[in-house]
Amino acid sequence: MAARDYDLFVIGGGSGGVRSARLAASMGKRVAIAEEFRFGGTCVIRGCVPKKLYVYASQFPEHFEDAEGFGWSVGERSFSWERLVAAKEKEITRLEGLYRKGLENAGAEIIESRAELVDANTVRLLADRRTVTAERIVIAVGGRPQAPAGLVGAEHCISSNEAFDLKRLPASILISGGGYIAVEFANIFHGLGVETTLIYRGAEILSRFDGDMRRGLMAAMQAKGIRIILGDVITAVTVDGEGRRVAETGQNGSLVVDQVMLATGRVPNTAGLGLEAAGVTVDARGAIRVDAFSRTSAPGVYALGDVTDRVQLTPVAIHEAMCFIETEYKHNPTSPDHDLIATAVFSQPEIGTVGLSEEEAVKTHAAVDVFRAEFRPMKATLSGRTEKTIQKIVVDAETRKVLGVHILGHEAGEMAQLLGIALKAGVTKDDFDRTMAVHPTAAEELVTMYQPSYRIRDGVRQ
Ligand code: FAD
């Protein structure tokens, strides 16, 4: 067999692709990685990182307000969207540079081009029309926002891709969607002073989260002044004479706003990738089908991260990449572990969660005990803010095993990370009970809820 150009060719320079390429190259493999936009991918360029920076920016008005209760007088304030966008750009460019440097230092070849498959060992690089061959190929092309099928005037709307770099901060925005991206952006824009409306076809936002989290967050968002329209959709968007967007809705008439943002879902980036020619099969949504070791239907071709539509989160894409390296280059077959992934919604207040929601737990466990606390966080006593913290532990009453923990409140994401370790280690409620509290914190409530708030037996709350 003729020698291939590379041991490994990676398509996509995002979270999963960069990790695979860097680790393989650092092991002495001949590696190339192609990226068509910017290294760092969705997470660094137009996802997790810029979003969190904007979340911080949007929290300052509440900090200024809260400061009064602690004796501070905060003078005149002003906000410059342009300065925020420029500062964000500087930071993501720095991170992009680190990603590139990491690849270069490991010895991977960086290719700035769209790449498409010709067959299971050959890739075409569109920038200079050359083809290269590789022993193994990793597809880590991620996903992209998708507008609802048939939405008239979708071209007048923005997605999360554009939201970070708008020329001007809109005075008003209508965000369509009920998932975490829609919810986070609603909080960001509202915090920055934008009149914000969220519209979602479902009965409640964040449908996959624990009911207490969903309802608690929705109440907090509404109390802040975010308008939430449920059970409705945008049917058409036009532009009026002043350049404003006119969104027609199914039930709520027409809404006139400066921007309409669609956060109605993401689809895998597989169109035109040459998957058929390479023998790589996809599901009905275009996601690449993989086995437990991220192997596609084509021998030698692997797929990981969002393009496989398993769990669309950065640490998951990175973990899948590390498992690929273990399996293929370290002779240690390792399949990604998708169980008990702790996660956060960076809303205001935040949600931090790991494990089963109450609704999921009662479907799979006959006896469930729920420990629940709702209280005003200490900071709110002097600030006068009415916001509530909710903490909830879902326990298998038969084994005392903790099935899930859900928190709505400040720094809930940070708490979820640590709770993730405990749940992964198989923590029981008795372990929580014998853990000393850290006082005074909000998290101490988690280890001082000794009696169940209620019990659920065979699906019936007692
Ligand atoms: P990506 O990071 O999307 O990388 C794919 C790369 O491939 C892209 O750079 C793309 O340009 C490139 N590419 C595509 N096709 C080709 C081609 N044919 N040739 C060459 N290059 C190509 N996750 C979290 O864990 N926490 C969060 O808080 C969070 N917030 C998010 C907020 C938003 C607004 C969004 C959109 C996503 C967020 N995510 C978050 C999800 C996270 O960004 C993704 O799960 C993660 O980036 C997936 O990594 P990936 O490697 O699969 O793909």
Image (tube, grey):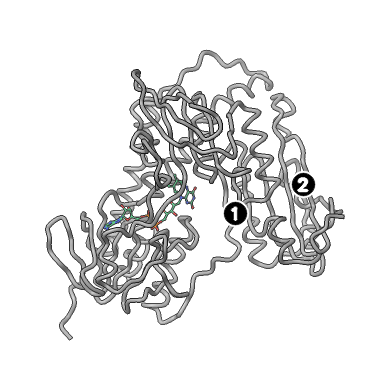
Residue 321, image x and y in percent?
41, 66
Q: As shown in the figure, which amino acid type bears the numbered disc 1?
A: Gln
Mark 1 element type: helix
Q: Position of residue 205 (x, y in %)?
A: 60, 43
* Mark 2, secondary structure of its residue: helix
Looking at the image, residue 368 sits to the left or right of residue 331; the answer is right
User: Mark 2 and mark 1: span between their CA atoms?
Assistant: 17 Å
Which residue sits at x=49%, y=30%? 189
In the image, is residue 171 above or below residue 302?
A: above
Q: Residue at x 84, y 53 (%)?
A: 454
Q: Which residue is mark 2?
A: 445
Amino acid at the residue labelled 2: Glu
Left or right side of 337 for 289: left
Task: Name the image quarter holding the N terminus.
Answer: bottom left
Q: Which residue is mark 1?
A: 417
Is residue 445 positioned above or below 109 on the image?
Answer: above
Query: Alpha-carbon neighbours of circle 2 within 10 Å: few (<14), some, or many (≥20)?
Result: many
Q: Horizontal and vertical percent for residue 126? A: 17, 57
Q: Nearer the viewer, residue 387 or 297?
A: 297
Which of the pair 67/192 is nearer the observer? 192
* Relative image position of residue 347 (x, y in whole percent): 57, 39
Quadrant where the C terminus sits is bottom right
In the shown orientation, is residue 243 left or right of residue 114? Answer: right
